[in-house]
Image (cartoon, rainbow, N blue to C red):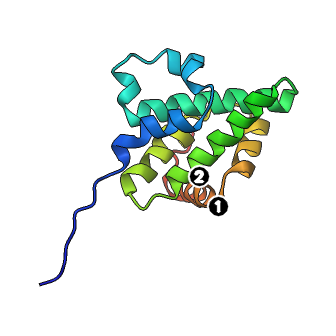
Amino acid sequence: MSNFTIQPSQYENIPAFVLAEVDGLSGSAPYGRLSDDDRHVAGLVCAALTKYMVDLQERAINGTLGGKESKALDDAYHVVESLASSQETRIQNVVVTEVFENIRTSERVLRVIISRLGPNARRLHDRWVKYGRANP
């Protein structure tokens, strides 16, 4: 008989992980719009992270981003890469559905965001664009 061990999913830990890793997210407008219950839903927290990250990236391009916010932007990219690096399909799916699909910005900012994705997030993004993205 082979050894079979059920591993707990890390999906439920996403909201706490994201908040712990990205300084300023908890005080951001996108996160502030979430209800207390919604703040425990991985997808909704990741969608708020995306809106916060896009706002920070737009401000970085415009030259209006402060030093602490610059670190928060770097941390947001790190979180996206960490989630994309997970072996759990459910976690990779949240990156696609709540991060990539929620990026609403200019083409210029989008190009910068894509260029800053880590290798696993970039692979996931490229696969989504090639196979899963709805054509407008």
Q: Which residue is mark 2?
A: 81
Q: Which mark is residue 27?
A: none
- Residue 129, image x, y percentages: 58, 53
Find residue 108 and report its image quarter: top right
Q: In the image, 47: left or right of 69?
A: left
Give amino acid for label 1. Pro
- In this view, the residue in front, 83 or 99, is 83
SS assignment at label 1:
helix
- Residue 126, image x, y percentages: 60, 57
The N terminus - image quarter: bottom left
The residue lying furthest to the left in this view is 1
Q: CA distance from mark 2 to mark 1?
A: 7 Å
- In this view, the residue in front, 28 or 131, is 28
Q: In the image, 131: left or right of 72?
A: left
The reply to whether discs 2 and 1 touch (Cβ–Cβ < 8 Å) is: yes
- 113 in relation to 33, above or below: below
Q: In the image, 77: left or right of 70?
A: left
Which residue occupies 59% across, 54% down?
A: 121
Give amino acid for label 2. Glu
Q: Which residue is mark 1?
A: 119
SS assignment at label 2:
helix
